[in-house]
Amino acid sequence: MAKQAKDGAADAQQTPAASHDGAEDIRTADGGIPVAPRGRPVVERKKKYLVAPRATLGGFGTSSWMAPLGLSAVQQALTALPDIDVVDTITPRAGLATAGFGPSSTGDSTEGVVVARMTDQKASELLQRGQGQLLVERDQHLELLDPMLRRPDLVSSLTPYQGPQSELLLAVVDKDGAPLPDVEVSLFGGVLPSSAVTGADGVAHLHLYGDDASTISGVYVKPRADYWSFYQRDPDLRPDEPNVVMVRALADWPALRGLPQQSAIGWGARAMRLDQVPQQFRGRGIKVAVIDSGAATTHGNLNTIHEGFDIINKRTDHSTWNVDALGHGSHCAGVIAASDPAWGIRGFAPEAEIHVCKLFPGGQISQLIDALEYCIEHGIDVVNMSLGGSAPSEALERQIVRAKQAGVACIAAAGNSAAAVQYPASSQHVLAVAAIGKIGEFPPDSYHAETIGADIDMYGYFTARFSCFGPQVDVCAPGVAVVSSVPPNNFAAWDGTSMAAPHVAGLAALVLAHRPEFGSMVQARSPERVEHLFQILRMSARPVTLSDPTHIGYGMPDALVALGLPTAQQAMPWQSAAAGFGAPGSMYAMPPGDGGRPGAAGASMQPQGMQNQQMQNQGMALQYPFAPMRIALW
């Protein structure tokens, strides 16, 4: 130790450092001058930004930026600027020219976006130079929200430095008493929340701060797959002995008896009357994209999926779209198109061509834009987006507009924050789906019971407490205790508007495949085609729950009505209106835009002339005050 100290002092005597006036001082350990640590100064790191020309272009304040610019000119200018690193350029691959995003006066296309790394200060300078004619927007990271558990909004206290601590043991077993490994167990209340995962012996070791287990307000048990969750309010827990929770298998539930050996239709599909749709209605010829965390084709219900693209790993191996570490994309894909041999769960459109765009974990807005470009290029008919964020993105909105103009129908989850509808579901160019549940479709001691709203109707339908609401909600769909496929070859019951949106996306695929007007004009891909589809889904819906349209929109779509099929019950006014769309002369009769969205006072239809005016120049007006955005899987 003495030798090390001596060597350190010698090093200090020979280390030059800059003084305040620029001269070098010899720093010594005993000369009264502090020894300066070596290293590089801390500066702001560069973040990804999206940069693109707006439709109306002009000069940028310097000689090199004076001419009207297209995307390639913007890319060249950014490359030439110091302290900016261009990392990617997303351009239209399909060669589709969309209104409002065509070529500049120099012939250079204004479509697409440049992804560049720069500091916030550099981005601010660039935005100022653009004088409103250049889009400069932070490329926000995507993040995943747990589809089941609503985490505490904040931590109310810090971990105690001292005081009593104990270990609480909680064992999870099945009905036969066999231990269940890999089960997430969480305690709420007390001094701090605590969570752990059960080991091979089925026991979770949870830390309890304080010696009073009576302060625990809830225990939540979430098996990874094949079992129902468990939730107990104000549990009677003993820290001096193991506490045992017995969870039930999904297959023990009457509606899922024998799953997966015996094929079943989920409660949500039955509520939307898919079980009454003729077997030959299977969605053949329609392409559906699932922009999510991938899809595990190891699953027996998903092994017919053969198309996909890993957006987040496209520079290394874009073929890894069939690896789903989160299970979220597999669950959504199963609701839409799970195949139905005599095994597992049947989806809405088992013969639709599914394309998987892998975006999670770790995706960003630029990669969502890239995924939508994939959809345009491959002629996708319906896109399921079980993701979103709190603030709109101008760059993403431009791409959603391009997709709609190309005939791509985007269906999005409204969000799980129990607040205003989140973006992109709040965009007028997508169909926003809220979540509902139904009493009797899940065990009363499962966590699903915590989602029950106060507006239960006579049939047991309720709006999910977590579901976002507002005038942007178009329809609602089952999003509580939805059973679907998860990796590697299992099933799970999840909650979320993420689970509601694919119910509507699957029905949309059936409508496009089997309604006569779409079959006769399948090549007429246009925004009017998309809006006509949206209006059929809206007008097929029936009101459920006791809530108002800001929570359920038009209500829950009915598969028989949307497909123009005979119904066993007397047709209601909304059913007659939707069935009337089946006449060949009705194609594109509904106004484009968001004319069908209900507000708090009910539906409001804008005059068709007004809607057509909105579609001129830029196709569909971008009406949002755009701000930085952070989006997540729901």
Image (cartoon, helix red, strand yellow):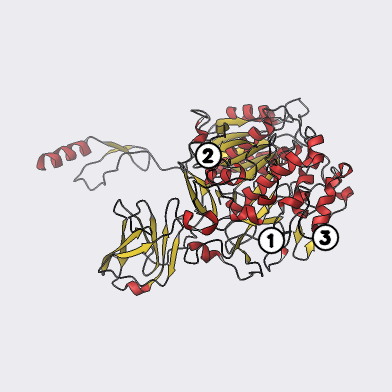
In this orientation, does residue 141 appear?
A: no
Disc 1 marks a residue whose amino acid type is Ile
Viewed as shown, does residue 182 lie left or right of 360?
Answer: left
The N terminus lies in quadrant:
top left
Confirm or deny contact between disc 3 and disc 1 (CB under 8 A).
Answer: no
Viewed as shown, does residue 36 lie left or right of 128?
Answer: left
Q: Nearer the viewer, residue 585 or 358?
A: 585
Query: Residue 180: where, in percent of width, then height?
Result: 35, 54
Q: Which numbered disc, 1 or 2, marks the residue that appears first in the sequence?
A: 2
Q: Nearer the viewer, residue 541 or 141?
A: 541
Query: Residue 484: where, in percent of width, then height?
Result: 54, 48
List the single residue furthest toward the left.
2
Dot 3, how many residues are within 10 Å of its Cα: few (below 14), some (14-19), or many (20+)? few
Q: Which residue is mark 3?
A: 573
What mark, if any, has residue 204 been given in the picture? none
Give the Cα distance between marks 1 and 2: 29 Å
Q: Which numbered disc, 3 or 1, marks the residue that appears first in the sequence?
A: 1
Disc 3 marks a residue whose amino acid type is Pro
Between label 3 and label 1, give the one nearer the viewer: 3
List the single residue furthest toward the top.
107
Q: Nearer the viewer, residue 241 or 311?
A: 241
**What residue lies at 76% left-to-right and 29% top-to-bottom?**
103
Circle 1: element type: helix
Disc 2 marks a residue whose amino acid type is Ala
Query: Residue 556: where, in percent of width, then height?
Result: 69, 57
